[in-house]
Image (tube, rainbow, N blue to C red):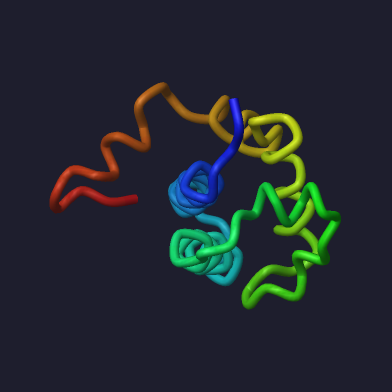
Amino acid sequence: MPVHNADIADVFDEMGDLLEVRGENPFKIRAYRNASRMINDMSDSLRDMVEADRDLTELDGIGKELAEKIREIVNTGSLKALEKLRNEFPDGITDLLHIQGLGP
């Protein structure tokens, strides 16, 4: 199944949520959330950009690490770093974060 920008943005949103629950560096969390917003607002397809071997670091807010993660998501449909992070928490933890008034 082809990966769309919204799929990549969702992965980055979840990464940001789980990193926040874990108590990670706020700048790292913000980088994932900002990248997610930017990707959702993009009109160009990241999948097409990856397939054309474009330099993703030319996009605002996308550094080398996030560019590599985008490529992994486009090429495999998943992100190993997210799977590893998910294993640190009980199932459904991110669902709880979307309840009004409940946060990390």
Residue 82 falls in image quadrant: top right
Considering depth in this image, is 19 or 12 the residue closer to the camera?
12
Q: Quadrant of the N terminus?
A: top right
Query: What percent of the width, then of the height, locates residue 12?
Result: 54, 50
Residue occupying the point 75% across, 40% down? 72
Query: What percent of the width, then of the height, locates residue 101?
Result: 14, 53
In this view, which residue lies farthest toward the right? 53
Left or right of 46: which side holds 86? left
Considering depth in this image, is 10 or 91 the residue closer to the camera?
10
Residue occupying the point 68% across, 39% down? 73
Query: What percent of the width, then of the height, locates residue 52?
Result: 82, 54
Left or right of 79: which side holds 91? left
Marks counted in the figure total 0
Left or right of 91: which side holds 12? right
Query: What percent of the width, then of the height, locates residue 68?
Result: 79, 52
Residue occupying the point 64% across, 31% down? 78
Considering depth in this image, is 53 or 69 the residue closer to the camera?
53
